[in-house]
Image (cartoon, helix red, strand yellow):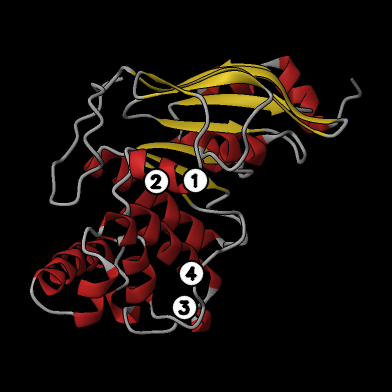
Amino acid sequence: MNKAFVQNSFEATDDGVAPGEVLLAVENVTLSFGGVRAIGGVSFDVIKGEIRAIIGPNGAGKTSMLNVINGFYTPQIGTIWFRGAERISMKPHEAVGQGIARTFQNVALFKGMSTLDNIMAGRSVMMKRGLGWQMLWQGPALREEIEHREKVEEIIEFLEIQHIRRTPVGKLPYGLQKRVELGRALAMEPSILLLDEPMAGMNLEEKEDMSRFIIDVNQQRGTTIALIEHDMGVVMDLSDRVVVLDYGKKIADGTPDEVKSNQDVIDAYLGVSH
């Protein structure tokens, strides 16, 4: 991979992994709910600095895989390696603390709060002052608040949403809500960003805007991205590598060109019987 990263003041977390090395590895992960197997023996890795797509038909296990990576589910079998360390079990808030952030299929924002306050919520995991200091809102707590607000304002400018910074997000069109959710995830300064269908429900113009921001996040911030997306045009344009799931199993893994010419992938998307 040959990407030049532009440094700026709100970079991804320093994770000790060099660009081009494995940042995250999924090894033989199996996840079942009762008698239903959502994921069956899936392995793949994510290289630092790349955009890694996870695709497949509905019900293939894609979102379940993201839920395993960010600690929402614990697999019955298999191992997650992150930043060179084996991760036995982890809660979502612990994953955020280690540098894993995500967005969701359905926008999960505080609808009555402004764009600024929603993105500011992403900084809460990084605040060091206790509740007492925060209630007083002076001295160290005030200085910390100002520092975090400066980071949030940089993200707002980066995502070109200055005009809605004070608008309650519940009043925003869907495409802008998705952008605010991206901003909240970026506020956590992740080393890997998990995007679950970031283009879902968008029109063509909104998809073009979101694609541009995803590329900028990856190339300008150096943030590694793993994304689920159903728009194959977007996947092929954005991704460095693609892993394909079908009925919870991996059926292909490679570059976009390799994957789109794979017969198993063609069959899965055309609905050929197994």
- Which comes sooner in the sequence, label 4 or label 1? 1
Element on which disc 1 rests: helix
Residue tagged 3: 169
- Which comes sooner in the sequence, label 3 or label 1? 1
Please name whichever residue, 173 or 267, is drawn nearer the observer in this view of the structure: 173
Locate the N terminus and report the quarter of the image it occupies.
Answer: top left
Element on which disc 4 rests: helix
Element on which disc 3 rests: helix
Q: Is residue 84 left or right of residue 154?
A: right
Above/below status of 213 relative to 154? above
Residue tagged 2: 96
Q: CA distance from mark 4 to mark 2?
A: 21 Å
Q: CA distance from mark 4 to mark 3?
A: 6 Å
The answer to which quarter of the image holds residue 243 is: top right
Above/below status of 147 relative to 226? below
Q: Pointer 4 and pointer 3: residues touching (CB < 8 Å)?
A: yes
Residue 16, how many percent across, how many down?
22, 25
Mark in the foreground, 3 or 2: 2
Q: CA distance from mark 3 to mark 2?
A: 23 Å
Residue 33, how many percent across, how many down?
79, 36
Residue tagged 1: 92
Mark yes or no: residue 63 visible. yes
The answer to which quarter of the image holds residue 181 is: bottom left
Q: What's the residue type where badge 3 is placed?
A: Val
Q: CA distance from mark 4 to mark 1?
A: 22 Å
Residue 263, how many percent across, how many down?
73, 16
Q: CA distance from mark 1 to mark 2?
A: 6 Å
Q: What's the residue type where badge 2 is placed?
A: Val
Identified at 71% across, 34% down, the residue is: 61
Residue tagged 4: 177
The residue lying furthest to the right in this view is: 273
Crowd tier of the residue under label 2, counting other residues whose Cα lies within 10 Å: few below 14, some 14–19, many 20 or above: many
